[in-house]
Image (cartoon, rainbow, N blue to C red):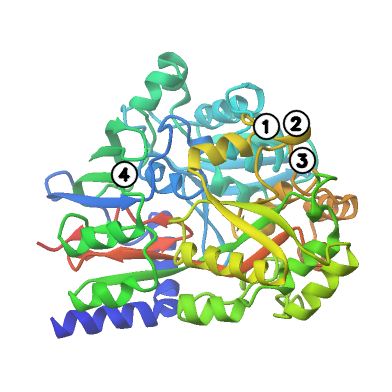
Amino acid sequence: MSDRKGTARRFVRSRSKELLGAVAVSALLVAGIGVSGASAQEMQDDTIRFATKSISPSLGRPEAGTASPSVYTLWPIYETLTRVSPEGDVTSLLATSWKNIDKTTWRFTLREGVKFQNGKAFTAKDVAGQIDYLINNDEAAGTVAYGTNQKQAHMVSARAIDDLTVEIKTESPVPELPRQMAGFWIPDIDAKNDLGLAAFSKAPIGTGPFKAVKFTGGVDGTVDYEAFAGAWRPAKVKRLKTIALPEAATRVTSILSGEIDISQGVSFDAIALLEAEGHGVDVAERPSVMGWRFMSVREDSPFHDKRVRQAANYAIDRNSISVNLLGGVSPPAGQCATRGTFGYNPDVKPYPYDPDKARALLAEAGYADGFDTEAMVLPGSFPADSEIYQFAAQQLTAVGIRVQLTQIQFPEWLDMWFGKKKGPEGGMGFSDIFQNSCHNFNAIPFDAYPNLSCQKDLPSHCDEEESALLTEAVEEFDTEKRRKLIQDLMVLNHENAPNLFFVDLVDMTGLSSRVRNFSNIIQRFSWSDITLEN
């Protein structure tokens, strides 16, 4: 017992070194070098039991689920052309290489011998078909991947040159297209078209190590998977079961009771509880910033005034959040980029805690007596998020921004985000403050910024100077010039303060003592590598 407890503690405290090792191993695996996968006969006749906050609403729409927590349900099934390490390096996955033909044309060479879970060969036609679906099908409009891959990458067409070469054209220069492809999951588009979306959602087909065989949606949903023996990265355990457990505390107690092996999104306080019983917690860096967003485009909102948004930022004691609620694991944040992310600006510091300055700015903006407002939140998604949101509400209230917290569910959040549930002036239906962290899934702020700007179909914030700088950065092929443009964007956005950033996020995953070979690289769990010690 003492040895396991010590191992768990070292695992948590030495995570940065382990991440480097995990990235190196990952690079070997995706390149097809080194360790080979287990054969069907060598697979463990066992089940990995995984608990997450919620199940993706549809297993057949990977374009709709690239955000947490849906990503955890879909990654066992689907794969992407590339992947990105926490340090921002682009490595191969379904594509082995890529080259820029001209400023608006890219060609990707695909991996040989990859098959879909129905036995069909994976070819360039499948990549081109999914891109065509994202560009031209109304079903895809308004999904996460449409926003982060089609609109953001400005793709206008894709075609198969041969079975293993796909050519992608963009409307404007996109020097980071290979990085963008790390957020672009590829289903068997022929099966999806033949079956229809509803049927395909119940029997999705990808190239990943596990095939979904039973799907129950909803807040208490489950997904049963079986290992795909024909996978190019075959799983080492025969079965995987994903279970939705909305409460973080329940996900922890389920490990302690032996019902669950892996639990996504555990709290910092869970470390001591799990260690005491010989279990552990994986702490992984994540290129995302936890925060709230202000609906600054509404002219009748107090947050339409930049001074009010700045006041809210001065009202928050981020150091206290980091140290007292997260044990110093997550540092205070002040920009839409994390340390190590391409474009991070070390000169942009988090707003200091200064409640007197917050009150002065409110008075200057005409709110000396303060005002009432609402913040819509989804507790249970991030470590200590319930406590952080309550703390933030208390601190804002203390300076005169009287916040009422309203809990909503992820499907409701999605409906408002994509305009299915509209608010005043036909915009998103969120309150004037709503939970929306800055997620850079591919370790570059281009992932998040279109949704922070005028470029979003229903924007919450629109500043023409920011949008012009973003466009210039996106189209700049010179790496250092592009970095400088993004860093300038960080300065401008910090000044405009459309977000209330709290801390840089980490992923905290509870692990049963029987779990081996687990790693988490930017919310991609090592499903093909995990083994269980019985």
In front of the other: 528 or 375:
375
Label located before the other in sequence (1 or 4): 4
The residue type indicated by label 2 comes to Gly
Mark 1: few/some/many CA within 10 Å (<14, 14-19, 20+): some
Residue 525 lies, in percent from the top left, at 37, 56
The residue type indicated by label 4 comes to Pro
Label located before the other in sequence (3 or 1): 3
The residue that label 3 is drawn on is 104
The residue that label 2 is drawn on is 426
Circles 1 and 2, Cβ within 8 Å, touching? The answer is yes
Mark 2: few/some/many CA within 10 Å (<14, 14-19, 20+): few
In the image: residue 186, left or right of residue 134:
left
Determine the image quadrant of residue 128: top right
The label nearer to you, 2 versus 4, is 2
The residue that label 4 is drawn on is 209
Label located before the other in sequence (2 or 3): 3
The residue type indicated by label 1 comes to Lys
Mark 4: few/some/many CA within 10 Å (<14, 14-19, 20+): many
Determine the image quadrant of residue 395: bottom right
Circles 3 and 4, Cβ within 8 Å, touching? The answer is no
Q: Is mark 3 on a helix, strand or loop?
A: loop
Q: What separation in Å lies between label 1 and label 2 (alpha carbons)?
A: 6 Å
Tell me the number on the disc at residue 422.
1
Mark 3: few/some/many CA within 10 Å (<14, 14-19, 20+): some
